[in-house]
Image (spheres, coloured by chain):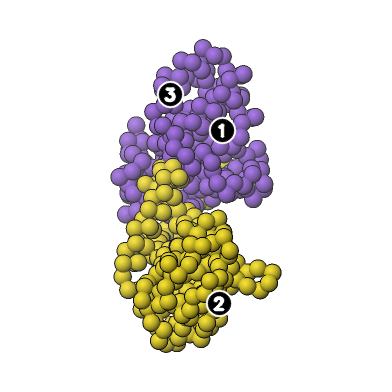
Chain colours: A purple, B yellow
Amino acid sequence: MNRNEEITDEDLVFSIQQGDKEKFGVVMDRYEKKLLSYGRKFIADTYRIEDLVQDVFIKTYENIMSFDTTRKFSPWIYRISHNIFINDMKKKKAIPFHIFDFDTIFPHPEGEYLLSKEVTDKEIKDLIEKGLGNLSAEYKEVLILYYMEDLSYKEIADVLEIPIGTVGIRIKRAKSSLKGQIPSDILDK
Amino acid sequence: MNKQDNLKKNILDKINKGDIKMKPKIYFTFKTVLVWAVIVATVVVMSFFVSFVIFGIKESSKLFLLGFGSAGIRTFFVAFPWLLLVLEIALLFAVDVLLKRFKFAYRTPFIYLILSTVILVMFTSIFISSTPLHETLYQEVVEQKIPVLEAMYLNVKRPPSEKGVFRGIITNIDDDMFTIYNDDKDKDEDDGYRTIFIPKDQSKYTSSVIKVGDFVLAACSQEENGRCYVYGLKNLKQNSKVK
């Protein structure tokens, strides 16, 4: 096993912060495919996604000293990606601009919408991928982060900078939208 | 070389050449400190404005208008400093948008954040109101020491006389009218003698209730005949003397 594979993301970032610039290559190896796949869920133009992922890595490197290595790295880099993808979509008017995100204004109980991780099998991932076309960006994103990127509710809340309860309600609503395309026995597991 | 390696090499080359640089830790520390300084300053400004409104309402006796029936309530709201309230709401949202940069805030539903900020501002305003800050500033403005605050403070203690609300010492009482005299040393439109008429059905404003020498707040409405008929009266202080 390659020695770099044993090192956690957070330790890698710590090394970069200490001056080991080459370690940033390992970070890029680990996240390039994930971020390209994440970007594809929002943006259709492959070349544009590649440019944006490059921007994500540049921004990540520029801001790496602000990362607290006692926290998890993946939500942090997804947060940067989220901002870059969403800003690009806003510039191209691909998503409507909202001053207020009404889902984040009022409280939603955190535990009520928690799903069992057992349902995150390949079948539901495939179905979600097929059914994402009609979903709005905010619903697409929570499903991708939860089912495809395997982030927890707390991590998704950090990526999107929204309350944990809002993550739950968005997943629930997104699933309801997909209901027509996903067999009920899988949804109700 | 595949696309992935290409992107990686491209970025690492730029890093090694110094085209892409890490921002130093002090930059982020400074940014955080700056954001917090702006948040604290905005909360202080908001509290200052709220306490100023409280000071104005208290000093001008406007609060008593609420006890003068529907006409008094209408006058109170017409004379309310709505511009400050709008500014206050704008600052409230600005503070909460800035707070949302922090984990504790973005994980909190926005309504709770707004309510917490409002409570904090109310407490700070009450604290400021308990200090002589506004009275001191008012005196400084009257003495023309702070011209920049003149527009804000100069008329703060005056009841809305343009809306028919006057304050003064009763100098004379007749069957259907009384006269008040006011001199708050600023020689503006609410100073001097003013005759206020008592409507026929308002026998409660007779000499058995008000006496010469009482310092009163009187709200009246202008009628077509040019006379101002009282619809609300509050005795603020008895046995005052015209100086």
Q: Which mark is residue A45?
A: none
Per the image, the residue denoted by label 3 is: A115
Residue B208: x, y in percent?
A: 43, 67
Which of label 3 and label 2 is nearer to you? 2
Residue A34, compared with residue B28, is above or below; it is: above
Which of label 1 and label 2 is nearer to you? 2
Q: CA distance from mark 1 to mark 2?
A: 72 Å
Q: Residue furthest right?
A: B224
Point out the image quarter for the N terminus of chain B. Answer: top right
Residue at x-position 60% and y-position 71% = B228
- Figure quadrant of residue A38: top right
Chain of the residue under the numbered disc 1 shown in the image: A
Residue A59: x, y in percent?
A: 48, 52
Q: CA distance from mark 3 to mark 2?
A: 76 Å
Per the image, the residue denoted by label 1 is: A140
Depth check: B46 or B126 in front? B126
